[in-house]
Amino acid sequence: MENTERTTQTSLKVKSSKCKDTIRKLYAGLEKIARAEEYKIDDKMLESITKDFKRFFEIGNKESTRTVKPKFRHLFEKEILKGMFTDQHRAISLLEKKEDSPINGDTLLLRAMSINVEKESAQDKILNSIIEILVTKCPELIVFAKNNAGYEGITPVHLAILKEDIGILSRMASTLQEIDELRLSKEKIQGICAVGPVFQDTIMMSGTPLGVAALKFNKEMFAVVLQHFASGLDVTNDKGDNIVHSLIKYAYLQPDKLNDVLEMLSFVLHCKFVTTDPIFEEKKWKIRKQARKLLMMTNQEKLNPLQLAAKKQQFRIFEFIMQSEVYHSRESGDGLFNEEVYDITEIETLNLEEDAEENEEEHIKHEQHESVLEYLVHHQTKNAFLFADFMPVKEVIRGKWKSYKWWFNGWFVIHIIGMVLLSVAAVYRSKLTGPVSRNNTADFAYVVTRNTFVTGVSIIGLLLGLSYLAMEISRILISRFQFKAYSNVMKRVLRHFSAPYSNFIFRIYFILFSLLLIVDCVIAAIDASGSLSGYENYCLIFAVIVGWYLVMFFLQTFKAFSMFTVLIQKAVIDMLKFALVMAFFLVAFSVAMYMIMQGADTEDDDFHAFSTTMLKMSTIMLGIGELGILFQARHPYLAIFVFVLFVLLTTILLLNALIAMMSNSCTDLMNDCGGVVASKLHCRLQKLSVILFLEGFFPRCICKEVGVKKRKYRYDNNEWVRNKQRRIWARSSVHDHGGTETEKSPDPLNLTYQSQGIVSSIMQQLNPEIKEKMKQGTRIYPATSSTTILEPSLKRSLSNTRKTDITKISDRTCDVCQQSGVQLEETEAVAEEFDEKESY
């Protein structure tokens, strides 16, 4: 019995070894097809390779849909996938010796589909027949993922989508449909996802077959994948990104593909594939629900598509999402007004917790839970303009600023008074009682603790410094805003410096100002007591400079001065780049001039030391100082040549380059956006930066919340919540005759009820034809001339949460009453000017 068992085991091992060698020969055959010219492959050899595949997969024999043949299991063994094939498997002579080829985790089907050959060639036909054999005879190969560090997770399904081969993809789908679920489960088919690092920042970054089809913008393949290779529209990859997240990231990486991305988003979110494919008609309501869910899902960074679009500075996608039914709806109250409702939960800066009551302690937001407005101040000017001019964003900023402007202006007045007192006190404290002594010590006439006015101002300065320091400490403790563009600290700091609307620099100045005031008061008091001597108001000197510069922080919210703060910040960045280059030239020419001027016949000591030489060269660069000393050098012509070269490279070239850089920066800042004056948008963004600055340390009870709270049916934390609390902002505007089909209710009774506005009722009495149409349930729109005047009583009837916007009226013929109608076209010039007058 033992001998029989050993013999059986030995025969099985031999059989298994032969089977594995055969598989390696199949890999070698695929290599020959891929490198046909190198191997000099002819039609006879191609037929031989095809026969090897047919022989191994036993073409013509009846296949089971329930089980996998034992020899097919060797195709997925690590020994094969992690191994190699040699010249022995290639069946070539010793004279044509080649290196062993690694398989690198590729299955036969994946390797076959990776080969690129000329279309309609002999190799292409043979390759297609081999792929057909592999797909039909061993369906497990279709969804078997590659196990390789760089390309982990990729499957033949991904390759079929990348090659946009709808024929192969459809064949895979039909084959998998015939397979019993016990042999290949739906979870395995629908759970494939490529996660290799090589796929980052490519079309494959989505990972899921549905996401890859979306990034290929192939609508036909998208429908096939959705039907057979995805559990639904809401599939996600290993980062938690759904297809909308992936499309936004792809638009950021490939800006020229933005129009294609928007078209694909419209195709997916509006479920246009439902009307083109009758298969989806049966479950269209489930699909539409999943489409809405896509815009509510968050990835592992806790960002939903709207927040991600704002973070990636994709305004057109952001606008598209905000206009979708998830965030925007229109409700008609009567024939004259439309109420547009926006969900501004992601735009609002303050956190909104489901169970938080007004008197409860605020739940601090976790990292990456930022609002859209937090991203906005880190955008560059052009992108920031687009977001700031979008209606809901603009109204949130306006609503918050109306509440905060009184606090801010009061703070401005206090700071100005403090600086005036500090400046006057600084002038008094600098006065001496007499001449300076021989040991260079000075006796001041007005000393802290000895003069009432100076002492009082020093105490005020101390209190001001402590309050500014407490403000920054409370900001750190509250940690309300924790936007981190980069994980690296240095990159985050540089990002703040380069962001034109960030208040990070002002925060540094406030800390520096407070420390200078505190140190000055303490040291001046110690010096007056006699415990310390020699303090000559050094801290006060710099405190006055920094304090008056901080006035720019307050002026930035005034339209007349808003651009100066941005321009100064941009100019400082340009100056830093210029200073670095200038430093190299200054050191180089200072060393050269110091060497040349040694031994010069002159009593001038400008070139006697290297430090004074650098100072002299700096003044020469600015056109200051006498040049006659150059002729006193031992080699005057060499000194003059070096001087001329220095002037050409610095004064003429570098300084003019700096002027050109600043001029270009100023031009960029002055460019208007969409017909809106640039200074207006700069002012709005500066107000936003101040709003975030104030909300960073204000207690929650003082912070302004825009909009009203309303419970809606939303997807949150992996489940649908019927009463999820959201923040809603609504506005009333003059009715637009146009409108989408979803805005027109088919219910005649509802239409008749909605059209009973004041103007509509008057029109019915004056025009019998309109009255007759009203009886038939037809919606009537009021005729208007070039202006629209609202009755005071009608204005008072509006809800307190509504806002009547000024609109531009254009002639348009109404299909119902055949009279001039109203077309909504938002303008904000009057509203903006009114706001500014009200603010200041």
Image (tube, helix red, strand yellow):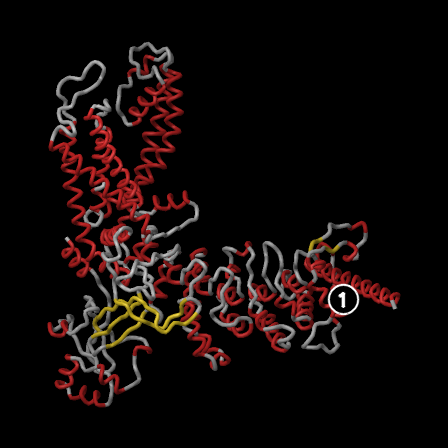
Dot 1: few (<14), some (14–19), or many (≥20) neighbours within 10 Å? some
Residue 678: tell me if it is visible: no
Residue 119, horizontal then vertical, whole percent: 62, 64
| Residue nearest the viewer, comparing 712 with 803 | 712
Q: Looking at the picture, does residue 6 appear above or below residue 677? A: below
Q: Looking at the picture, does residue 272 appear above or below residue 472? A: below
Residue 482, horizontal then vertical, whole percent: 36, 52
Q: Secondary structure at mark 1?
A: helix
Residue 346, horizontal then vertical, whole percent: 34, 62
Residue 348: tell me if it is visible: yes
Q: Which residue is mark 1?
A: 52
The residue positioned 26% from the left and 71% from the top of the image is 340
Residue type at the position of mark 1: Asp
Horizontal side of 398 relative to 652 (left or right) equals left
The residue positioned 77% from the left and 57% from the top of the image is 89
| Residue nearest the viewer, comparing 720 with 598 | 720
| Residue nearest the viewer, comparing 404 with 87 | 404
**Quadrant of the rendered image containing residue 638:** top left
